[in-house]
Amino acid sequence: MTEPVAEPVARLAHTMATRALGWLHHNRERGRFPAETTADLTDPNSTYKSLGESALAASLLLREGLASPAEQRLARELLDFCWSQLGNGDLLYERQVQFPAMTDPLEVYGPLARSGYRHRRLHELLTHLHGLTSQRGTEHVPNRRLAVASASRMAGLGDEADWPALLGATWLGHTPEPWAIDWMTAYCLTHTVFHATDWGARPGDLPAHLREYLETWLPVWLDIWCEVKDWDLVIELLIVDACLPHPRSDPEIWRRVAAAQHGDGLMPRSGEPVTEDPDEAFHAHHHTTVVAAIAGALAVSRHRGAAAAV
Amino acid sequence: MSYPDASPQADFAAAAEALARHVLGALKGTQEPPGPGAFLAGAADTKAALAAVRVLGPDVFAPLLLTGAPFGAADRDAVTEAFRVFPPLPQDGEEVAWRDHAAATLLARHGGEPPGAAPPPVRVASRPWREGARTLARLAPLTLPGLPGPFTEPPAAHLLTACRGLARSLLRRDHTTAARLARWAALAGRGARRPLDVATALRHLELCGGSGARVALDIEIARRLLAGREGRTG
């Protein structure tokens, strides 16, 4: 059973999610692939990554079932746009054929597949690769291995992962000195929780000792990164909070984050000024706006779950 | 006796560092004689030295309370004079009032004037953890053994607040606050499972926390509290 989220937090979270979704939808054309893009993707961390993240946010908004009919339409149109940019899956398929060891096609495909977008040949290829011994031995960093396991589960390829072992190999799994965390490690931690809980759908899948560890130290980490206005990381930590069985939903943190969001829905990644160039702003703040949509949706969902449980 | 009033705050801070080195040496058995009387006698700026005695407050008694080091008439007179030159002020906050009350209580045990009534209890458990940690840091000298407790709750009630504050301070490179909170984390965690390893945090502070004597003194006291070595030499 979840703890009730304070009502003002639920309102803030809902506003944040819907505004962020509106911005992602309104600006989606800025995330279009350049003409003549091929599957080898000279810069996979640019448009390709943004499309995958937009698709993830939209898929989670639909999964949580929180959106109004108008917002559901926006989320669906955003998914359609991403799928279309990916050649209705052809680009993912061609990339996976060219680079069988790469896992990013699967990681992008997972949320889309769960939302009903299927590419038959890609799916067959992914299923085949999923069964290879080679894939189990790929030398990922530990939280990336969790990402692959999570994407496989989302795409319906099967779930044979040894989740406790995967978790145990991560930084979080070692329950380290909380004061030894740094910026990059904090991102590793957030992604560990995202994937282990399937973005908050399975809060009970976190072992008790990791839940206790996170409940103890999340307030400290939220505090220090809120102090320096690192909104991107703060919001990812708020998602972690929403992935716990008993989210803390600190109203003060939520108020500060919500106050940082622009009226059009853009969520700045930091306290630095936002460029007035809309294309630059899109590329610089797209990720943070994606996580704002996800954090808002999950927080509202947990609130609704709590209300339903009463 | 009056003293020339030419000591800027920087001189007081330097004197507090010097006294902290003196007390640290006394704790480790390398400072002879160990008490604040010897520090005052050897100081070039007497007023700054007296200010330092007031700044360190109960911690000038740490060698006595933690190792049984002698505390003689010259030491009593030094603390008494410090109180005379820098008396407590009515507008002092609750943490300062409690530090003064603790120092006066210890002084009274060694021939000083009886202390006044204890200040009102400090409430930490009902405050948000960050605010509570700030209060605990300011009350760090009250972790010494045998002092009146400033709280209505037992120290164990503040373990989580102290540990969160310690982690936060380390992450912010606020080594002064971290060392002070380590004292509470050491004391409050006795008989309980601490959410972090205080000994490791202290070692990290020792290696990465700069060369300040006041931080070093807090680390040494925290170590002794952690080991339960109060009242023993060494």
Image (cartoon, coloured by chain):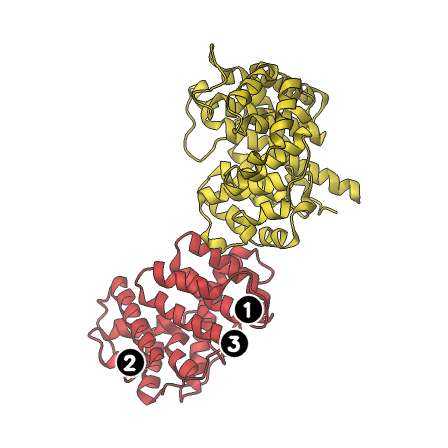
Chain colours: A yellow, B red
**Going 54% across and 21% down the picture, which residue do you hit?**
A97
Hey, which quadrant is residue B160 in on the image? bottom right
Q: Is residue A102 left or right of residue B48?
A: right
Compared to residue A296, the image places residue B198 above or below, namely: below
Counting from the top left corner in percent of width and height, residue A285 is at: 48, 28
Check disc 1 and report its element: helix, strand or loop: loop
Of badges 3 and 1, nearer the viewer stands 1
**Going 26% across and 62% down the picture, which residue do you hit?**
B10
Compared to residue A117, the image places residue B101 above or below, namely: below
- Label whose residue precedes the other's in the sequence (2 or 1): 2
Check disc 2 and report its element: helix, strand or loop: loop
Q: Pick the quarter of the image with the C terminus of chain A.
A: top right
Around disc 3, counting alpha carbons within 10 Å, would you say few (fewer than 14), some (14 to 19), or many (20 or more)?
Answer: some
- Label whose residue precedes the other's in the sequence (2 or 3): 2
Question: Do marks 2 and 1 both belong to one polypeptide chain?
Answer: yes
Reading the image, the residue beneath label 3 is: B118
Reading the image, the residue beneath label 1 is: B189
Whether residue B116 is visible: yes
Q: Is residue A292 left or right of residue B61?
A: right
Say which of B176 and A287 sits in front: A287
Reading the image, the residue beneath label 2 is: B31
Say which of B59 and A50 sits in front: A50
Hey, which quadrant is residue A75 in on the image? top right
Whether residue A236 is visible: no
Query: Disc 2 to disc 3, how far (Cα)?
Result: 33 Å
Q: Is residue A203 left or right of residue A97?
A: right
- Label whose residue precedes the other's in the sequence (3 or 1): 3
Counting from the top left corner in percent of width and height, residue A161 is at: 64, 41
